[in-house]
Structures are given as C-alpha cells and as structure tokens.
Image (cartoon, rainbow, N blue to C red):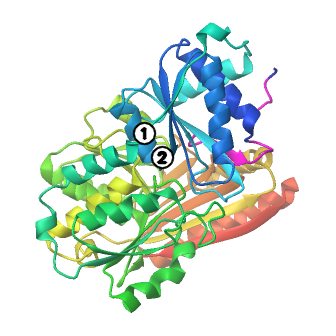
C-alpha cells in the first residue's frame, strides 16, 4: 500500500474520528507492524478505554499482533497509566492502548509503549509507520501468537500505589473531603479508591462509565469544569480532582482559586521534588515562568521539550527528577509514563504532609496572568499552511526583541517576563496559542495581535476558521 501522504502518529499516538481515520483495518495493520518491529517474538499487553469502538479496535490490533507472531496479554478496560504500568510489571515486550484520551466520543486512537512503560519516542513511531506501509503477509499457522486474559492488573497497580504512600494516611486532617470527577471513564475504579485509602472522604461525580461521556466533555479544560465549581462550597470540599477520558491527565479546582492553572501545580510538584534532591525538571514549551522561577530558585534546572514529548527528553536526561506539561506528570521514581491517577495521589500526599489546604500551598507560587486559546481550522493541511504564514509574521514583528525557541511551534520570551507561543495542534485541526505576562494589558495586547494576524492570514489564504476558544486567568 502506498503512503497516504500523512504521518500516522501525531503529538500523542494515533488519533482521529472513527471510522474515517481510525478503524479496524488500521488497528490490525498497526498490530502487524508492531509485531514486525519486535521481530515476531515476545508479548504485548493490550488495553482499551470506555469508548464504544475501543473493544473492536483492541481485538483488531490484537489480531494483527498475533498474525505477526506476537502473543497478547489482554488487560481489557483500563486507564492508560495502568496499561503502561502493566508493561513494566509483567515484563512485556511492549504495550498498546486503544484510546482517544480527551477527544470527543466519536474519536479513537492508539498509543504504543516500550518495555519500560514509556510511550514510543518518535524514532520508534517512524519505524512502525514504515512497516505499516510496507505490507507483509501474516505468519504461518504454526507461528501465530497466543491470547491470554489478564485479570489482576487493577489490584496490582492499586496495591503498589497505596504502598508507595504508606504512612501518609495517619496524617490526614479529620473531615478532609475531596470531589473526584472521572469523566465517565474507567479511572472511576481507581482514583476514588486510592484517595479513600489515604483517609480522605471522597465524593464522586461523573464516575459512572459511559462511552458517550454524557456527564461532560472528556477534556478537563477550564471552560468544561467551571460549572462544577459550586460543588466545592455546597459539599464542603477542599478540592475537586478531574481526569480526562483515559486518566493520563489531571485538572484541579479549589474553593478560592476555582480552576487551578496547570503551571502552578507543576511548580508545586517541582518544589516538593527539589526538596528531596536537586536536579533537572523537564517541561514542555507551553509551561511558564512560575515553574521556571520556582525550579531555579530551589537549585534545579529547566530543560525544554516538545509538547507531548516530555518522555523523549527523559531519554536524554535519565536522572531528571520530574517531567511535566499541562495536565500531565511523569515522576521517574514511580514510572516513565504520564499518570493522572498517581498525580492525584501525589497531590493528596503533599497536602497531607504539609498540613495545609491546597489553596494555601499555592499562595507561595509566583503568579502571572495567562491566556490559552485554540482556533479551529477547516483541515489539517490548511492548518499547517496558516501556521507557517503566522510564524513568519510573528518572527518579523518580534524576532529581534525576544528570545526565540522553535522546537515546537514558535515561542517568544521577552525581557519583561512575558512570553507567547503559537503552534499547530498535533491531534486536532486547530492552531493553539499560549501567553503569559505579569501585566494584564500586555497579555491582552499579544492576544489581540495573534488573533488578528490569524484572521487576516486566513482571509488572504481563503482559509475558513471555526470556533475560537480562549481561557484566561491569573
């Protein structure tokens, strides 16, 4: 089969609408390609999320693996972090997760993991793509892989995580209440359990599994979660912890701050880890100066990574103490995968050990005004064309007055501690922009400039723009 003129893997695996982009044929051939990458020998763990198409795609991918000589351990319905954990725990050759993460329910996708539970780096994804297009017949009947159903992955993961936090429970302040929102996903069977094991009173919302995500959109954005803010006061809860569709992400609401900016959580986690030992903190290009300031003031060093690829920088800096991007956290001391369940547990552990509510702990993190926006584009091809034109316009305007970082989109860091980043989404047909500044007026000026440039370029190129969504805060 000839190449379709596009990469299969985006920012975080393969993802797109079913069946136009992601379908059983694609899943089967990805399984066959992965089997060839592994030399036709070994075992691959396969899991899937709650979406209505996930079981079908998991079976199709498993069929491809087995046709290529690989045995399959079927974990069934699990969060992505548990699939990644299982690869290391069961000493599998690799892992495959069927999920579209935070995308709408009609989408689906595939994420691949290496033997350590780390998501495939780009070089491995490229090899899978090459083998995907270089079609090869299945193995003979005597060489096909076996199929085994694994039933204890949940209990082993939870036991390990709770044991890691042993000793914390006794420090819980009486009547500590948290709300957990699992986005109608399988994390409903995990995060509430862990927090209760730590001694918290847990109230759940959207913790019934539903392939249509009826409770809310599976992406735990500010605009999605704002309607849940009154629950904190009504129920006397200290924080609300919210996952996405596969539990590799975590968002937080508090009574005082409402939606907590992700940078402030990353800064808090960094501060906590740097107290244990100094070292490198890996962050994505959309992480701001709150984190940079906290890390550098506490003896650490920032290393920048592309969004969705913080795990690749861990390959270059294996002794890093933390890797993070908005919503996602990798603690190498726990594992080499992004884990929203672990992140919720670690946050609870910090609150308990510090003996203060999260709002009080966040008061110590340097604040900035911020803006995060997305602009829908008619097609991915037009998205790329529009981005290149926008990048050239912004370089002409700001290239001489700012430090430019172009490892993922283009980021401009100005001397007044203001920065702006624009980049094409790696998973959707959207342009995204991120701005931060100590000055509210400066932030507004940059936001208006970027949006105005996009609209002007789109008009000249006859590119149709869709919905523009902007979240702001401080």
Count every numbered label the image shows and give the total.
2
Whether residue 20 is visible to the viewer of this picture, yes or no, is yes
Crowd tier of the residue under label 2, counting other residues whose Cα lies within 10 Å: few below 14, some 14–19, many 20 or above:
many
| Of residues 382 and 447, the one drawn nearer to the viewer in this rendering | 382
Q: Residue at x 62, y 8 (%)?
A: 142
Residue tagged 2: 80
Q: Residue at x 15, y 62 (%)?
A: 168
Which residue is painted at 27% across and 58% down in the image? 346
x%, y% of residue 195? 29, 65
Say which mark, if any, is on residue 84.
1
Q: Contact, CB < 8 Å: mark 1 with mark 2?
A: yes
Residue interval drawn in magenta: 3-21
Mark-to-mark CA distance, 1 and 2: 6 Å
Residue 348 x, y percent position in the rendering: 26, 65
Q: Is residue 263 magenta?
A: no
Badge 1, how many Cα within 10 Å: few under 14, some, many 20+?
many
């Amino acid at each position: 089969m000839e190449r379709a003129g596009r990469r299969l893997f985006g920012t975080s695996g393969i993802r797109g609408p079913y069946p136009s982009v992601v379908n059983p044929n694609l899943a089967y051939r990805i399984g066959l390609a992965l089997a060839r990458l592994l030399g036709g020998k070994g075992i691959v763990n396969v899991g899937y999320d709650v979406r209505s198409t996930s079981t079908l795609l998991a079976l199709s991918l498993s069929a491809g693996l087995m046709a290529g000589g690989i045995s399959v351990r079927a974990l069934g319905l699990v969060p992505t972090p548990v699939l990644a954990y299982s690869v290391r725990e069961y000493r599998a050759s690799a892992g495959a997760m069927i999920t579209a993460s935070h995308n709408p329910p009609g989408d689906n996708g595939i994420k691949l993991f290496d033997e350590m539970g780390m998501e495939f780096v780009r070089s491995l994804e490229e090899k899978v793509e090459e083998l995907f297009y270089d079609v090869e017949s299945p193995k003979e009947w005597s060489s096909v892989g076996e199929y085994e159903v694994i039933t204890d992955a949940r209990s082993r993961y939870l036991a390990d995580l709770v044991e890691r936090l042993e000793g914390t429970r006794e420090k819980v302040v009486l009547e500590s209440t948290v709300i957990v929102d699992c986005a109608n996903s399988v994390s409903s069977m995990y995060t509430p359990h862990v927090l209760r094991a730590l001694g918290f009173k847990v109230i759940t919302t959207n913790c019934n599994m539903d392939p249509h995500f009826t409770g809310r959109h599976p992406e735990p954005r500010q605009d999605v979660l704002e309607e849940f803010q009154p629950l904190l006061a009504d129920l006397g809860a200290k924080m609300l912890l919210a996952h996405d569709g596969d539990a590799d992400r975590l968002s937080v609401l508090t009574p005082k701050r409402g939606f907590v900016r992700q940078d402030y959580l990353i800064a808090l986690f960094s501060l906590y880890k740097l107290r244990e030992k100094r070292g490198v903190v890996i962050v994505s290009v959309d992480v701001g100066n709150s984190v940079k300031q906290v890390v550098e003031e506490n003896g650490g060093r920032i290393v920048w990574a592309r969004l969705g690829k913080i795990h690749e920088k861990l390959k270059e800096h294996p002794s890093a103490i933390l890797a993070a991007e908005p919503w996602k956290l990798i603690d190498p001391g726990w594992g080499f995968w992004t884990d929203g369940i672990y992140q919720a547990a670690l946050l609870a552990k910090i609150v308990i050990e510090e003996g203060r509510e999260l709002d009080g702990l966040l008061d110590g993190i340097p604040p900035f005004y911020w803006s995060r926006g997305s602009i829908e584009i008619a097609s991915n091809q037009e998205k790329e064309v529009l981005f290149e034109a926008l990048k050239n316009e912004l370089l002409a305007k700001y290239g001489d007055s700012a430090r430019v970082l172009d490892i993922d989109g283009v980021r401009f860091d100005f001397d007044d501690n203001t920065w702006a980043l624009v980049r094409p989404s790696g998973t959707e047909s959207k342009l995204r922009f991120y701005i931060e500044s100590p000055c509210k007026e400066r932030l507004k000026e940059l936001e208006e400039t970027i949006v105005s440039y996009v609209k002007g370029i789109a008009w000249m190129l006859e590119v149709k723009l869709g919905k523009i969504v902007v979240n702001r805060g401080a």
